[in-house]
Amino acid sequence: MKKAIPLADAEIGMILAKVVTDEKGMILCPEGTPVTERLISLLKQRAITTVSVASDEEGMSEDDYLTLKDKIEKRFAAAGDSESLLGKLKITVLERLKDKKG
């Protein structure tokens, strides 16, 4: 689940759940970037006041689940059957995703 928080409340190790852009739309950090002291400092310099971070507090929304499931399915499209190593990995990743959904 995504949760928008003030940059001042961001903690080291949190994961950005949404791309961070400046006022001109230039991408400063991609989704999935871990929050570091350096990142917080750089975002402050760019006058960024809010970031979206991943949150496990309330589980994953249905939309987020379906989006991630679709990405996983596409990524493992060439995995073949469920007996291949990639097929087994795909099943494991999808099961972990389902666990996150709750």
Image (cartoon, helix red, strand yellow):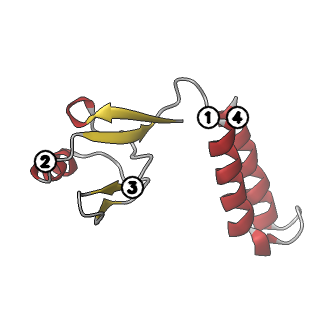
One can see residue 99 in this view: yes
Residue drawn at (44%, 46%), measured in percent from left and top? 17
> SS class of the residue under badge 1?
loop
Where residue 37 appears, as percent x and y from the top left, is 18, 44
- The amino acid sitting under disc 4 is Asp
Q: Which residue is mark 1?
A: 60
Q: Of discs 2 and 4, which sits in the foreground?
A: 2
Q: Which residue is mark 2?
A: 41
Disc nearer the start of the sequence (1/2): 2
Q: Secondary structure at mark 2?
A: helix
Give the residue displayed 20% in from the left and 32% down from the top. Answer: 8
- Distance from disc 3 to disc 1, alpha carbons, whole Å, reads 18 Å
Q: Which residue is mark 4?
A: 99
The answer to which of marks 3 and 1 sits earlier in the sequence is: 3
Farthest residue in the front direction? 24
Q: Residue furthest bottom?
A: 78
Label at residue 71: none
- Measured Cα–Cα span from mark 1 to mark 2: 29 Å
